Amino acid sequence: MRTPSQKDDERRYLMSFLRAARINGSVSPLPDGSGPDFVLETDGHTVGVEITEFWREPPTTGLPRRQIEGIRDQVLRAAERACNAASLPPVEVLVQFQENQTPFKDRVNTLTTELAEAVRKHFPAPGQHRNLGWDFGEDSRLPPEVVGLTVIRRENASESLWLTVDADYVRPVSAEHLQARISAKNGKVQRYVRASPEFWLIVVFDSLRFSGTFDLHSPAFNCVYESVFKRTFVFDTFSGTVRELTTCNPQPAA
């Protein structure tokens, strides 16, 4: 199975955005460095579309939440591949990691092996599930980075699903942080003028992850942002919410 690339993610975001915004058109990706991420043909005109993800601001100490999620994803994908290679039937695997214990790089391969072995050792019968954790006895002891593991074997399942069980609270959107994300993209537009006469920026809140989950009623959405893009949107992937930001162009007219 091919690992999705950043371009795959960006295309998925854009197609979801177009459906949510009820915009029809055809989408063509552009090679990196040759223009915006995509060219959209809609209503008889061409629009260059730039996609950018919006994550929590990094903490003053410790790893950013998004980086922690990335390491955990790496472990889950590798353990899933190991179980598939062992020809195990499809299952749902829910992993609860220690809140304050992120696997170091030199532990990733070992943790992957330990996690896959725990699933193989406690593989449920069809229609059954297994709950593993500190309270389930010596023979179900898990790696130190993991506090809970649930393996569900559903009848007639066609593919496996490995997920992280997590909890956190929804954060407000910082207007300063959002402006910084827009400003980081403003400088690219001048290099893209040959690709399209009009440009949109879509700021994606990937709310399938806690690092990308924000309060969609934050006062920050009432602010005016400096953007050189013709239209600037915020798109929440889980709810399908599309907000067009009020903007002003910081560059003087020619």
Image (spheres, helix red, strand yellow):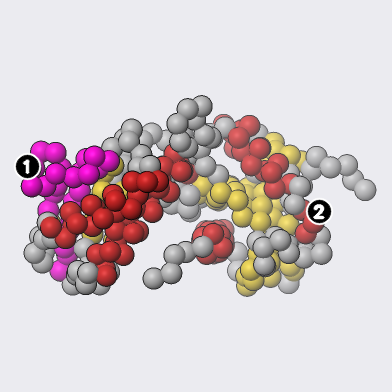
Numbered disc 2: secondary structure: helix
Q: Earlier in the sequence, mark 2 or mark 1?
A: 1
- Give the amino acid type for the residue marked by disc 2 in the picture: Gln
For the residue carrying disc 1, how many other residues have a C-alpha within 10 Å: few (<14), some (14-19), or many (20+)?
Answer: few
| Chain part drawn in magenta | 130-155
- Which numbered dot is residue 190? 2
Q: What whole-number distance in Å separates the C-alpha atoms at marks 2 and 1?
A: 62 Å
Say whether residue 65 is left or right of residue 219. Answer: left
Occupied quadrant, residue 68: top left
Pick the residue in front: 61 or 130.
61
Q: Is residue 83 visible?
A: yes
* Magenta-colored stretch includes residue 44: no
Tag 2 near tag 1, CB within 8 Å:
no
Residue 109 screen position, x and y as percent: 33, 53
Tell me the residue at 12%/53% (across/down). Answer: 130
Tag 1 residue: 137
Tell me the residue at 69%/44% (across/down). Answer: 184
